[in-house]
Amino acid sequence: MNTHIPAWIDGTLTPVEKLDAHLRGLRHMAVSVFVRRGDKILLQRRALGKYHTPGLWANTCCTHPFWDEPPLVCAARRLDEELGLRGLALSPRGQVEYRADVGAGMIEHELVDIFTATAPEGQEPEPNPAEVMETRWMSLAALRDSIAEMPEQFTPWLRIYLDQHSDQIFSAAS
């Protein structure tokens, strides 16, 4: 399986093994998706076998594109692979950049293409247990309250997205 992701080394975009990019804290490309239904957002709890942030709650889908994989293609691929969600119309919400310690000596320094989508009533996720241990639908207000009460249960990037990029992601979102 291709585990090389686009990362910058000395200012040049280069294919780098994913774990190496995290251990070195290299700035790299990423994709995040927020799937909504009405006023609820689909969240996933990362599988315990994940090499960083296992068991923490994250947005619907977050991943890294393969080398030369367009972000939109990556987002659709990972929604299917992680959650069995197919056929959703993905709307680009721009890019954000963040840097966060994710534990075990690893740093996520990501330039992230953000997408939103709307899931129709009746379409429920079918989580891949190697990727996702649990899902839940939660309103943005309830999510903010939960993060304020128990921040340690949520991934650093989800906390950053809601704190610093919420308007970009959710204003007039699909």
Image: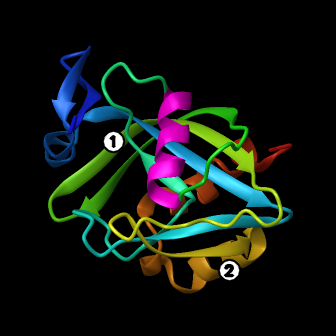
Residue lying at the far bottom of the rendered structure: 149
Question: Which residue was labeled with disc 2?
Answer: 145
Q: Name the residue nearer the viewer: 81 or 100.
A: 81
Say if 153 sits above or below 43 in the image.
Answer: below
| Horizontal arrangement in the rendering, residue 68 relative to residue 16 (left or right) | right
- Residue at x-position 42% and y-position 79%: 152
- Magenta-span inclusion, residue 87: no
How far across and down, in percent of the image, does residue 121 sit?
83, 64
**Residue type (three-letter) at the residue carrying disc 1:** His
Relative depth, front residue between 69 and 155: 69
Is 9 placed left or right of 143 in the picture? left
Q: Eyeballing the image, is 86 above or below 93?
A: below
Residue 76 picture quarter: top right
Give the residues in magenta: 71-83
Badge 1 vs badge 2, beta-carbon distance below 8 Å: no
Tell me, yes or no, whether the highlighted magenta stretch contains residue 76: yes
Q: Is the magenta stretch mostly helix, strand or loop?
A: helix
Q: What element carries label 1?
A: strand
Q: In which quarter of the image is the C terminus?
A: top right
Residue in view at x 13 percent, y 42 percent: 20
Q: Which residue is drawn at 52% across and 49% down?
A: 80
Tell me the CA gap for discs 1 and 2: 26 Å
Question: Up-down: is 148 above or below 86?
Answer: below
Which of the 4 image quadrants contains residue 64?
A: top left
User: Which residue bears the numbered disc 1?
Assistant: 109
Q: Please name the amino acid that badge 2 sits on.
A: Asp
Report the residue at 26% width, 63% height from top.
Answer: 52
Q: Is residue 39 left or right of residue 58?
A: right
- Within-10-Å neighbours for mark 1: few <14, some 14–19, many 20+: many
Q: Quadrant of the N terminus?
A: top left
The circle on residue 123 is: none
